[in-house]
Each structure stands twice: as C-alpha cells, then as structure tokens.
Amino acid sequence: MTSTLITRRTALKTFGAGAAAAASLSLGMPSILRAQEGPIKLGFLSGLTGLETILGETQLNCFNLAISEINNAGGIAGRQVEVTVEDDQTTTRGAIDKARKLVNDDEVDAIIGLIASLTHVAARSVTTPAKKLLMYTTYYEGDVCEPYFFSTGQVPNQQIVPSVEWLTANEGKTTYIIGSDYVWPRRSAEEVQVALEAKGGKVLGAEFLPFGTQDFGPVFDRLKAAKPDFVWVMVAGNDLITCLKQYKSFGFKQQLFSNGLDESFSFFHPELTAGTLSNQAYFMGLESERNTAFKLAYADMYGADKPINAISEAAYDAVYLYKAAVERAGTTETEAVRAAFRSVEFDAPQGKVNFAANNVMRSNSLLARGNDKGQWEILENFGQIDPEVAQCKL
C-alpha cells in the first residue's frame, strides 16, 4: 500500500515547528540540500496485518504524525517528505519482498519501522547489501552490529538488566520464562538468565511456543509445579492476549512481568494488564511538558482514545533523528547521513535521545505497573542508559 504526500494539519503547528527545530539542532537549511529537487522518500515497513497488527497500526500512526509535522513545518530543509507504506504481514517472506520493493522500485532514501525480530533479520538481508539505511524502532535482542542498521528501541542492558535488578530486590530470585518461538524471546531469555544469575537467581524453566498457540494450559501446569517467585512473559502480538487471559484463569499469585506489554494492550484489555509489570522506554504516563505536547498532537490527529506505546514513540523519534541527520549532512546520500547520525540529537517525548557508536539509541528505561484503567504507573525511572552490543565497533 502506498500513501501520497502526508499534508494533514494538526492544531499544534507551532509544536511541530518547534520539534523540527530541536531535531535539527537549530541548524540552517544547507544550500546543497535546498538545491536538490523533488521530495525526500521514506519507506515505512511493518506488520499491519497478521500477528503484530495490534502494534503495527500504532507504530504507523506515530510515524505519520512525525511526517505530518515535518511537512507542515516546511519539510526537511525545504523538501517535502513522501512516504511509501508496506505491510510485511509479520513474515520473513513479506519483509524480504517489501524491502526489495522499497529499495529497488520505490528507491526510498531510508526504511523505518518493523516489529518482530524475524522481520528485521529478513529485511536486513536486503538493506545491508544494498547499503540502504534501516531504522528499527522496536526493543530487541541487541545482537546486530551493521553500519546501515540503526535502532531506536531498547536493547537488553537498557530493558532487561534494570528490570532484573528491581525484580530480584522486590519479588524474589527465581523465574519461569514463557515466550514465542523466535529470535527475540530466545535470545532475550539468555540475557535474563545471565542477569538473574549475576544476582544469585535462577531461571527454573523456559518454554517457547509457536505463533498462534491457543492452549497455554500444559505450560501453566508446569509453571505451577515449578513455583517461581515471578513469571517472565515474552509472547508476541495477539498471542499475548490469549496468554494473559489463560494466566488469569489459572489464578496465579506470582507477579507477572512482560517486557512486551504496553498501552496497545492495556487500553483495550485493562482487566488483563492490571497489576502486571513492564519495562519500556516510553509510557504515556511520563510527566513532562514535551510528552504532554506530543500526546495532544497525537490526540488531535487520531483521537484522544487512541493509545501510544514505546514502539510507536520510537518510530516518531526515528523520523526526527533522520531529519536532523539529513540536515546536518546537507544531503540524503547514505554514507553522509550515516556519519551525521553521530552528531545529532532529538528532544523526544521520552527525553533527549541520540545514537551511541553502535548505532543504538541512548533510550530511557521505565518500570511501570498496569492499573485497572489501562494506564501504566511508573514505579522506577532508571534514566537514559548507554546501549551495549557485545564487541560492536562501527
């Protein structure tokens, strides 16, 4: 699916212009960039149908909000941004095919989006050989060290490690892990085990189930027998709703933690998320003038009843960081933009953000508990954490 130029206006045009100025670090529009003709082309690629629909739609909303603000404020150095939106259906085949289309047919300057790790792995098989920028906006297992891959989502030392420290101090030293059967839960489970053992804890069991699992009963029977202090869930997309419903029906007393829970689930299923814990770089309940303005702009465009989550906020940040890098470089040429990412920052809704040398964003780490209204009450703000990717030097 392809969108035309996004020109829908928000009532907060001054906010959009201010954000654009912050993103470009008050730089003027370089004459070399202004001299180029035609729009800047960005591709959005994510799961808009299939397992991750519940997350992909919100991610696209925040991406479009950033594009709308930027275009209404004059574009990137005077050039409007043209967007092509593609649905990978949360499949490796879809990610490969749509990435090829965006790179070869649409000739986009960069691709932003993606949710499941299996799709970023697939898309990178296209973008990395083509030397095309790919900006991944979802928390993930953190194993990637490639010059054309940038992440605005959390990696394990920003999300898992601080959560383990809090859980072992407040809930106990043992856990049981339940996840979907793909790279993010499996690699993340290894990181949980390392972090937990460093605190004298232990993973009592780890089970990974195929997409579309309808019966979690046998897993919960084994969980009940293991008697962990807390339960760690990394079930993906719509399957997580099924998992939470059945978890509630079993009447477990242990604290449930999931680093995959956010407003996309809690807004529509507060009865399932009340009392659960999650760690994200962004929650709507974060108190700041910047976040208030962001939420107002989003509500103006999509309605006050629509959720925003960390994945979507990270997509918003990615667009503005790309804008800042292009304006700093004075061109959309990939190598120049890639180098410029090292020296730009953005005053994001989660706080000021920028990229570390490993191409991962220095993002925040917030631990929150869901309430019965579908909101997340922040228990601990660990602040902005430098991302770690083992043996990565770019």
Image: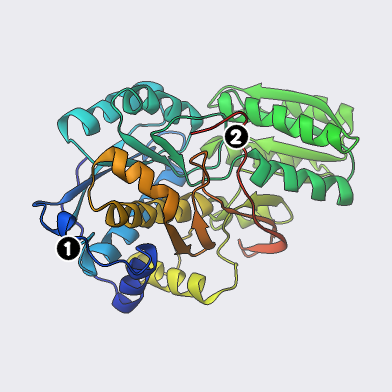
**In the image, what residue occupies the spot 72% across and 51% down?**
276
Q: Is residue 61 visible?
A: no
Residue 267: where, in percent of width, then height? 54, 58
Q: Residues within 10 Å of mark 2 (few under 14, many from 20)?
A: some
- Secondary structure of the residue carrying numbered label 1: loop
**In the image, what residue occupies the spot 40% across and 48% down?**
341
Side (left or right) of 197 relative to 304:
right
Q: Which mark is residue 37?
A: none
Side (left or right) of 187 relative to 325:
right
**Marks 1 and 2, how far apart at CA:** 36 Å
Q: Residues within 10 Å of mark 1 (few under 14, many from 20)?
A: some
**In the image, what residue occupies the spot 52% across and 38% down?**
358
Q: Identify the image's colour scheme: rainbow, by chain, secondary structure or one colour.
A: rainbow
- Secondary structure of the residue carrying numbered label 2: loop
Q: Nearer the viewer, residue 141 or 225?
A: 141
Q: Nearer the viewer, residue 364 or 373?
A: 364
Cβ–Cβ below 8 Å for labels 1 and 2? no
Residue type at the position of mark 1: Gly
Eyeballing the image, is 321 above or below 287?
above
Q: Quadrant of the N terminus?
A: top left
Q: How many marks?
A: 2
Residue 41: where, in percent of width, then height? 20, 46
The residue wearing badge 1 is 78
Lower sequence index among marks 1 and 2: 1
Q: Nearer the viewer, residue 18 or 278?
A: 18
The residue wearing badge 2 is 389
Side (left or right) of 196 relative to 268:
right
Residue 119: where, in percent of width, then height? 43, 29
Residue type at the position of mark 2: Val
Q: Nearer the viewer, residue 281 or 20?
A: 20
Residue 127: where, in percent of width, then height? 33, 28
Eyeballing the image, is 331 above or below 236?
below
